[in-house]
Image (cartoon, rainbow, N blue to C red):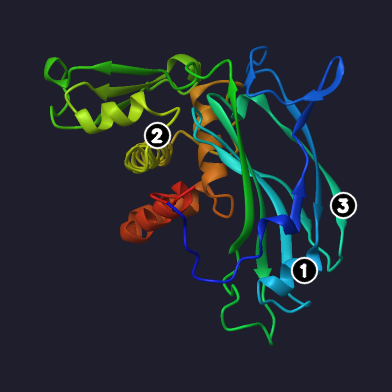
């Protein structure tokens, strides 16, 4: 199905990208689809050449030359559910802007499959733009996505299936995220996502996660958003979890703090706690936004 955008987008040929590569002990090598030698102590140093026709891109999107446009790289790790911006550059008005993307991703933020999204986005428009041009900051004019499977795909967030009839959970629920209480315990063994074998829709989506249908994608998006919600709620309801307290690397406490920081980089934990207490509906909407609930890829 072709996605229709509510604004003009330039053709894909205004951006030319080379392959991703990584820095290894043996030098630079192409980034494979699966990193068999990856572990949580590994920092991924990534590179990618990009060439953008900044002038033509603006013209074909209905923008003026004064429009502020960015070239960015976002990352998302499926197991840790962490995401962030790895790299950004303002996109000048040039016929051929050549740049090499360089970024480093710490291994303890990753896990599962790593998604790298290279995008051209609108930072701000300017007077004189076409009525059909994008106007909202963050509008995506062009994007490219690459997925890399890491060896630890099933270790940070282990997933197990079980019949909820035999467990103390609602039999009609699709899943349950178990989180231990010990903040200094290893995150690796502190979290378990249980999927209910009785829930056919969820089971089908989980089994098809490597090649999901559109319906499966909606289910998986809902599952990931709910897992993020539970993690954030767990962090904010534990008064013993503070940003200025150093928890051991790889611990549950360190993971929860990292989840909150990445999900809400503009908010302190105390500010989030106050909003959750005083404006729960607004806080719920903020969670939907940061988890990109039901946002098409």
Numbered badge on residue 205? none
Q: Position of residue 261 (x, y in %)?
A: 56, 43
- In the image, residue 223 sits, relative to residue 88, either above or below, namely above
Q: Is residue 13 left or right of residue 143?
A: right
- Label 3 secondary element: strand
Structural crowding at the residue carrying mark 1, measured as other residues with C-alpha within 10 Å and reported as few (<14), some (14–19) or many (≥20): some
Residue hosting label 2: 212
Q: In the depicted view, which residue is nearer to us: 296 or 2? A: 2
| Residue that appears at 45% across and 47% down | 291
Disc 3 to disc 1, how far (Cα)? 15 Å
| Residue that appears at 52% across and 37% down | 259
Q: Is residue 292 left or right of residue 146?
A: left
Sequence order check, earlier mark of 2 and 3? 3
The quarter holding residue 212 reads top left
Q: Position of residue 17 (x, y in %)?
A: 76, 45
Structural crowding at the residue carrying mark 2, measured as other residues with C-alpha within 10 Å and reported as few (<14), some (14–19) or many (≥20): some
Residue hosting label 1: 56
Q: Position of residue 131 (x, y in %)?
A: 57, 83
* Residue 41 shows in the view: yes
Sequence order check, earlier mark of 3 and 1? 1
- Label 2 secondary element: loop
User: Marks 3 and 1: which is nearer the front?
Assistant: 1
Q: Position of residue 37 (x, y in %)?
A: 68, 12
Numbered badge on residue 98? 3
Sequence order check, earlier mark of 2 and 1? 1
The answer to whether the residue labelled 3 contacts the one labelled 1, judged by CB atoms less than 8 Å apart, is: no
């Amino acid at each position: 199905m072709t996605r229709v955008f509510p604004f003009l987008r330039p053709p894909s040929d205004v951006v030319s990208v080379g392959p991703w590569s990584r820095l290894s002990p043996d030098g630079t090598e192409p980034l494979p689809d699966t990193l068999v030698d990856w572990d949580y102590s590994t920092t991924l140093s990534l590179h990618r050449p990009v060439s953008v026709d900044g002038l033509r891109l603006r013209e074909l999107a209905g923008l003026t030359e004064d429009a502020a446009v960015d070239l960015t790289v976002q990352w998302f790790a499926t197991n840790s559910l962490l995401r962030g911006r790895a790299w950004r550059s303002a996109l000048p008005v040039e016929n051929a802007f050549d740049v090499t993307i360089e970024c480093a991703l710490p291994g303890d933020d990753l896990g599962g499959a790593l998604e790298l999204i290279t995008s051209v986005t609108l930072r701000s428009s300017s007077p004189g733009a076409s009525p059909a041009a994008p106007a909202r900051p963050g509008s995506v004019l062009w994007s490219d996505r690459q997925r890399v499977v890491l060896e630890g795909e099933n270790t940070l967030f282990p997933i197990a299936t079980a019949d909820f009839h035999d467990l103390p959970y609602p039999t009609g629920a699709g899943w349950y995220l178990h989180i231990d209480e010990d903040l200094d315990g290893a995150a690796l063994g502190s979290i378990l996502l249980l999927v209910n074998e009785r829930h056919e829709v969820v089971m089908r989506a989980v089994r098809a996660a490597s090649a999901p249908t559109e319906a499966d994608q909606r289910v998986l998006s809902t599952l990931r958003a709910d897992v993020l919600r539970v993690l954030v709620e767990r962090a904010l309801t534990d008064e013993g979890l503070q940003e200025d307290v150093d928890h051991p690397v790889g611990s549950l406490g360190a993971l929860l703090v990292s989840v909150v920081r990445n999900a809400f980089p503009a908010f302190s934990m105390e500010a989030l706690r106050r909003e959750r207490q005083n404006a729960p509906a607004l806080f719920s909407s903020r969670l939907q936004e940061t988890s990109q609930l039901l946002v098409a890829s």
